[in-house]
Image (cartoon, rainbow, N blue to C red):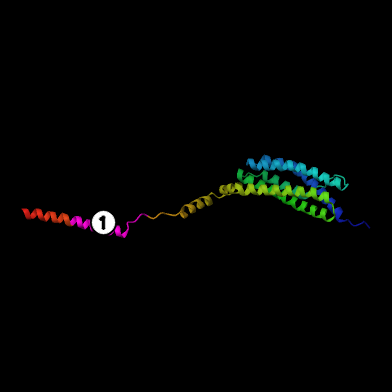
Amino acid sequence: MAEAGTLHDAFIDELRDAYDAEKQLLKALPKLAKAATSPELRQAFITHRDETQGQIQRLEEVFASLDEKVRGKHCDGIAGIIEEGKAVMEEDFDEAAMDACLIASGQRAEHYEMAAYGTLVAWANAMGHTEAADLLQQILDEEKAADEKLSQLAEGGINQEAAAIAHPANEEAEEAEDTLSRPVRAPMRKTAGAGRGATAADRANGSRASGGAAKKAGRR
């Protein structure tokens, strides 16, 4: 009967899966950058591509710290996410919608990696692999930062621009609502005292005019 595998075996298996995932993403990220219209989004993919190269080197250091051979195991999960991203890039979307979808594809990959590295860090700490845990934590922190950057780009204008193109009537309705909500100044009104004063003055002037006419009639 074969001996049962241990947590260390599962850890190495997961580590090889992560190594292959990074290798796949190293090839996929330039394609996402090329498909992006937003200069900021394009730069975010390029920057993370460079980070991914560094992450591969860190994973090789993790293997070395454990006296394990550097070897990847095909990662079906990230392969599926990359295929979904390719399908998105083949769609005939407007530029803003394409950027929004590219962000979604990128974040699917980031969330997958965050889950994988979170597990690897926890297992490394539990087994006392301190050096490996530190290196893996560095990778996890970079994945979280990349995900946050994509969220900032999405919420900073890309999603809104895509939504405005998809539903222009909503944008017009919001503008109309803003116009209606603005305060309207009431017309200036004369005070009650000023009105009565003007009427009394008018009566006084009328009385003097009438008196003058009566005197002229008496002289005749």
Q: Main secondary structure of the magenta part?
A: helix
Across and down, in percent, residue 123 comes to 82, 55
Q: Does the magenta stretch include residue 201?
A: yes
Residue to which mark 1 is pinned: 198
* Quadrant housing the N terminus: bottom right
- Residue 90 appears left or right of 218: right
| Range of residues picked out in magenta | 187-206
- Residue 192 appears left or right of 204: right
Q: Is residue 218 above or below residue 106?
A: below
Q: Which residue lies furthest to the right in this view?
A: 1
Q: Give the camera-side residue of 74 and 67.
A: 67
Residue 94 seen by the camera: no
Q: Give the camera-side residue of 32 and 141.
A: 141
Across and down, in percent, residue 153 comes to 63, 46
Neighbour tally class for label 1: few under 14, some 14-19, many 20 plus, Cα within 10 Å? few
Q: What residue type is labelled 1?
A: Ala
Quadrant for residue 24, please give it.
top right
